[in-house]
Image (cartoon, rainbow, N blue to C red):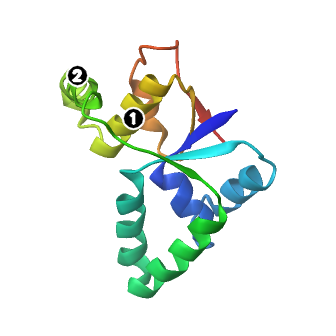
């Protein structure tokens, strides 16, 4: 089975000082599933790492990330319509654009499991392909 990794999960997994690090590590170490990383997630994680650790942190993260053997999921042009629909429908919530992209990719690939510690956005949006998204860990 496959799950999608959000920025908050990857950041917590990499950063020992993150409040969610222990939970992320426990989940990752007990999991043999395929990790799918939307390509829009990598720049967001790298922004957070640069903000907190500087450029040297990026070097370490890329090395760490390569060891995860994750697969990338590209955002495609057809996803933009769904992203726009999510952003418009939930305009008052001011959802994170990367989270909206992840939701569109999950719908297109018919995936229902997302590893994230940013639960608000993912719990709020009603997916088209299932009743709800399972938020891990």
As displayed, is residue 60 above or below residue 100?
A: below
Q: Give me the C-alpha separation between circle 1 and circle 2.
A: 14 Å
Is 79 located above or below residue 70 in the figure? Answer: above
> Where 76 falls versus 37 (above or below)?
above
User: Which residue is disc 2 drawn over?
Assistant: 85
Name which residue lies at 62% across and 62% down: 13
Residue 62 x, y percent position in the rendering: 51, 73
Find residue 47 and report its horizontal and vertical position in percent: 35, 68
**Residue at (42, 24) in percent of width and height:** 108
Residue 97 placement: quadrant: top left
User: Quick one: label 2, few (<14), some, or many (20+) residues within 10 Å?
Assistant: some
Which residue has dot 1 on it?
121
Residue 9 visible? The answer is: yes
- Quadrant containing the C terminus is top right
Tell me residue 134's x, y (percent). Answer: 59, 28
Q: Is residue 115 visible?
A: no
């Amino acid at each position: 089975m496959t799950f999608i990794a959000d920025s908050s999960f990857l950041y917590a997994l990499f950063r020992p000082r993150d409040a969610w690090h222990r939970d992320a590590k426990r989940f990752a170490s007990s999991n043999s599933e395929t990790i799918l990383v939307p390509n829009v997630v990598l720049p967001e994680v790298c922004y957070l790492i640069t903000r907190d650790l500087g450029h040297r942190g990026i070097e370490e993260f890329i090395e760490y990330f390569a060891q995860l053997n994750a697969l990338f999921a590209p955002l495609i042009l057809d996803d933009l319509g769904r992203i726009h629909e999510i952003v418009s429908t939930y305009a008052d919530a001011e959802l994170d654009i990367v989270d909206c992209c992840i939701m569109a990719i999950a719908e297109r690939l018919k995936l229902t499991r997302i590893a994230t510690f940013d639960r608000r956005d993912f719990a709020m949006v009603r997916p088209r392909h299932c009743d709800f998204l399972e938020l891990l860990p």
